[in-house]
Amino acid sequence: MASHIETDAVEVNRGLLKELEDMGFSMARAAWALHHSGNSSLEEAVNWIIDHENDSQFEKMPLMEFNIEIESPNPYDDTTETSQARAKELMEQAHKLREEEDTKREREREKERIRAGKEMMETKRIAEENERRRKAEKDEEKKAREKIMVKVNEDKRKRRLGLPTETESASTSSTHVSPLNTKRVVMSPPSPASKAEEMRECLRSLRRNHKDEDPRITRKTFETLMTVVRNAANKPGEEKYRRIRLTNNLFHERVGRYSEGIEFLELCGFKRQDGSEFFSLPYRDVDINRLRDAAFQLNAAITNPFFGLLSTEAEDREQ
């Protein structure tokens, strides 16, 4: 940059150069300003000087050439005082424009700082909420495990003492039959298992058949089924809450790859039409009571960490 300033000659407008000198600018800076602003106007030259007022390399006088082709009649016939007043006005205008630009940039930076601050606070809030949820789940799981162990140890103690356990007592009381009243009609055959029982057994089979997987995976399956059931029960009139695309990757990963998951939805009333990629619950088949039973069974599967891994009686006591 220094060699360029020392060796290159600059072409300037003689009239504009004189005006800039009358305004109080040094000849060196005035010459560089006219050269870099293309000798276009007095205002452009003043703006250039203000933009480079701290650049000391432009204090050195350049080699100048006065080219007659770029000369123009002097549009001003000002005295020195008038020129200096005009220079002051131009500089004030330039400074005002710069301050406005600086203020605008500062406002944008402040908006960005506020946005970044809000994002940071929201990220922190979500992290804290997730941590509280994980801690609560661990505490619930620990309490459930401790409760099971207390019952297991109590049954062991009773067996050592020759006392009946709760399970054995319940079994004995259930098998005790009072004398028949010969005047009463004979008992009817047992009724088939209810839908709620079928749903429960379906979920227990899912948990039991995949017990070697991470419990969080099957829990996510139960939670996804809960979402589907709740949406269908809360908004049965909206078709989108009664339709599931079987090719959806997320649904397949959480539910579709388990035969028990599909079976559970069928117990809720969902059907797949021939050739369709959707698993849907027809509006005419919506049974709110059945969906509520499904939600109840799913809640038991989600809240009990030993769901499907214990005997049915132990699960009943746990609930």
Image (cartoon, grey):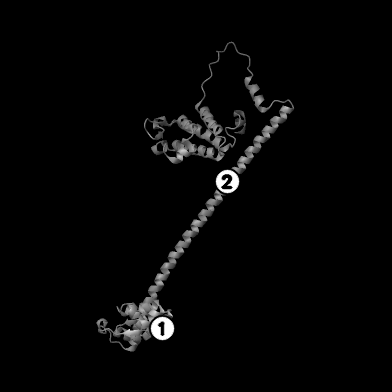
Q: Amino acid at mark 1?
A: Glu
**What is the distance, in whole Å, between disc 2 and disc 1 at their CAs?**
68 Å
Q: How many marks?
A: 2
Q: Can you tell which quarter of the image residue 208 is in?
A: top right
* Left or right of 168, for residue 253: left
289 relative to 100, above or below: above
Where is residue 283? Give x, y as percent. Answer: 39, 32
266 relative to 98, above or below: above
Q: Please, what secondary structure does the residue beneath circle 2 have?
A: helix
Where is residue 257? Give x, y as percent. Answer: 47, 35
Where is residue 11? Give x, y as percent. Answer: 31, 82
Q: Can you tell which quarter of the image residue 317 is in?
A: top right
10 Å crowding of disc 1: few (<14), some (14-19), many (20+): some
10 Å crowding of disc 2: few (<14), some (14-19), many (20+): few
Q: Which residue is mark 2?
A: 134
Q: Is residue 79 visible?
A: yes
- Mark identifier at residue 224: none
Where is residue 56? Give x, y as percent. Answer: 43, 81
Comparing 306 with 9, the one in front is 9
Q: Please, what secondary structure does the residue beneath circle 1 have?
A: helix
Q: In percent of the image, x 55 and y 49: which residue is there? A: 129
Quarter that holds the N terminus:
bottom left
Q: Amino acid at mark 2?
A: Arg
Sequence order check: which comes first, mark 2 or mark 1?
1
Which residue, as the protein is rendered here, is positioned at the far top? 182
- Mark identifier at residue 59: 1
* Left or right of 156, for residue 298: left
Quarter that holds the C terminus:
top right
Q: Can you tell which quarter of the image residue 236 is in?
A: top left
Q: Are marks 2 and 1 in contact (CB under 8 Å)?
A: no
Q: Is residue 24 visible?
A: no
133 relative to 312, above or below: below
